[in-house]
Image (cartoon, rainbow, N blue to C red):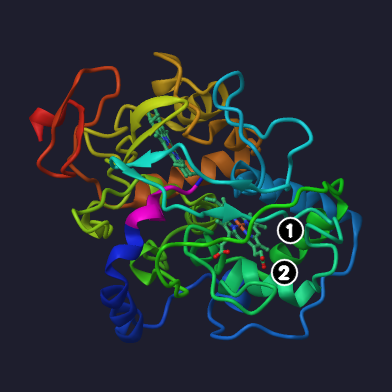
Amino acid sequence: MRQGFAFRFVCLPVLLLLIAVSVPQKLPASAQAGAGSSGASTEFHADFSAARLQRGHYLVNLAHCFGCHGTPDFVHGQGQPKPGTEGSGQILKDILVNGQPLPDGLVAPNITPDKETGAGTWSDAQFERAIRHGIGHDGRELFDFMPYAFFRSMTDEDVASVIVYLRSIPSVHNSLPKIHLPFAVQRNMHPELEPAFPSGATDQVKHGWYLVRIGQCNDCHTPADENGNAITAMMFGGGIRFDGPFGTETTANITSDASGIAHFDADRFIRTIRMGRASGGVRDLKPIMPFSYFRNLNDEDLTAIFAYLRSVKPVNHNVDNSEPPTYCRLCRQKHGLGYLN
Ligand code: HEC
Ligand code: HEC
């Protein structure tokens, strides 16, 4: 799930300014179709094919859509949606991000094909516009808790696949209140949270970048300042603290710095994700880390994600959830080994 943004709305004017001055994004050829465009197409079509159905299933898992648009089980399960709730949406609550509760009235809507309470009547273009451009089926600007800022890099083919898959899941009749936040919502594409595209890198690293975007790794693994703005100089350096039914946990430093995961190789990375165990086996990871979704990725994709993480700037930031929490002056949270920073 994408709690990282829950508190980032605070400095909206600053972020809007950032958008205005942001330089054109460099994108892989494969991602240009969706990412560069400023407006959504009313013509978008997502015709069925078996290949798209399969690809869509894979991507919805990577993006952990049903962790929000469903009821994740953090207590008896590992964050997977309770059976029968896939796509049915939920009222989001009971999670603190850096000590702040989620705003009242936050609802992830029902996106199953149910015609009355879900997405059964939405067109392909309406879906595409919500996923990549942050505009709801009814034309409203979506709150950035929905990770459209990350999904805007998805290729046309991939977003079509997601739509094909969503149309195939069982309809769930689940009537939810409309989202009703205690502040005005403006669409926010968060250019500051787009990791630099590694244009000179290998195809494997570029592919890793693409997957990391959809998996929103740096959303959770980048610390925030007092105003909730991402400390982008520490991207992937960890330091967002989550409290919820899964316990209290701070995101890890996943850069190649000695304080991060310098001791990983691709095999250990894959073991960590597949087993849901820190450093490939030391202790169970708390399921707010969506490993139960990422573990379904194939080896090639996990290896590409690891290769991309190896290419990002190393960040010096000690975080260890097996140690008692102490104040950290870098991320301004309390976490294990915070006193070392
Ligand atoms: C971190 C939680 C989260 C994740 C992950 C997430 N969403 Fe959302 N989504 C939301 C929330 C919250 C809203 C409502 C935003 C609003 O109404 O302002 C939303 C809105 C939407 C909408 C617009 C619905 C409408 O009323 O028009 C669609 C479509 C959607 N999400 C699809 C997806 C898909 C597909 C994925 C995965 C590829 C996904 N979401 C992943 C939280 C999430
Ligand atoms: C919803 C927030 C969230 C997202 C999204 C997320 N993570 Fe995490 N991640 C965490 C948290 C929290 C922890 C620490 C869990 C713990 O220690 O129990 C963690 C831990 C990890 C670890 C374990 C580090 C160690 O020392 O063993 C790795 C590796 C990791 N994440 C990689 C990733 C990658 C790669 C992605 C994207 C594909 C990602 N994470 C997306 C929250 C997230």
The x and y percentages for residue 40 are: 64, 82
- Amino acid tagged 1: Val
Q: In front: 298, or 119? A: 119
- Asked whether the beta carbons under mark 2 and mark 1 sit within 8 Å of each other, the answer is yes
Q: In front: 164, or 120? A: 120
The x and y percentages for residue 318 are: 19, 32
Relative to 254, is 267 on the left or the right?
Answer: right
Q: In front: 11, or 164? A: 11
Residue 259 among those drawn in magenta: no
On whether ligand 1 comes within 8 Å of the CB at mark 2, the answer is yes
- The residue drawn where x is 61% and y is 65% is 154
Quarter holding residue 237: top left
For label 2, the residue is 127
Name the N-terminal-most of marks 2 and 1: 2
Looking at the rendered structure, the secondary structure element under dot 2 is helix
**Ligand 2 falls in quadrant:** top left
Placement of 125 over or under 96, stated as above or below: below
For label 1, the residue is 162
- Amino acid tagged 2: Phe
On whether ligand 1 comes within 8 Å of the CB at mark 1, the answer is yes
Relative to 257, is 278 on the left or the right?
Answer: right
Placement of 331 over or under 288, stated as above or below: below
Q: Main secondary structure of the magenta part?
A: helix
The x and y percentages for residue 249 are: 35, 29
Residue 6 among those drawn in magenta: yes
- The residue drawn where x is 64% and y is 32% is 80
Q: In front: 284, or 181? A: 181
Q: Nearer the viewer, mark 2 or mark 1?
A: 2
